[in-house]
Image: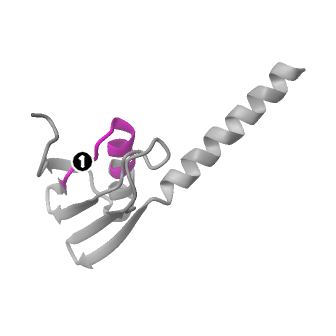
Amino acid sequence: MNVKKNLVLLIATLLFITNVSAETLRIEKINQSSYALIGEIGGRTYENQALNANYGAIVTNDGVVLIDSGASEKGAEFINKEVQKVTGKKIRWVINTGSWIS
């Protein structure tokens, strides 16, 4: 019984974390073909999926150009989902403007 209770608590916690991270990226339409994806100002954390920067999306006839893909796989997946939601198109190209790799 205790295992079942802990499992339910764990699932509820994970769902809460997912919902919190979904609110860390604000999307603003700049014009007919451009969007700004604005991340929170704080540091990179598990909760914000490392989405503590700003990103861009440019819509073309052939798909979306994404400017910066995020610092984590989960963050990139979230950006992809949100961009497709607002544009109705798939990301075809990515321009990463920087890297921390030396």
Which segment did they paint magenta?
Answer: 67-79
Above or below, 71 against 39 in this view is above
Q: Position of 78 compared to 2: left or right? A: left
Residue at position x 83%, y 28% in the image: 5
Q: Position of 25 compared to 33: left or right? A: right
Residue at position x 34%, y 36% in the image: 73
Q: Position of residue 64 (x, y in %)?
A: 19, 56
Q: Position of 91 compared to 16: left or right? A: left
> Which quadrant of the view contains residue 15?
top right
According to the picture, the residue beneath numbered tag 1 turns out to be 69
Residue closest to the eye, 52 or 38: 52
Q: Amino acid at mark 1?
A: Ser
Quadrant in which the C terminus is drawn: top left
Q: Is residue 81 magenta?
A: no
Name the colouring of the figure. one colour
Residue at position x 77%, y 32% in the image: 8
Outermost residue toward the right in this view: 1
> Which quadrant of the view contains residue 7?
top right
Above or below, 74 against 55 in this view is above
Above or below, 95 against 25 in this view is above
Q: Position of residue 91 (x, y in %)?
A: 23, 50
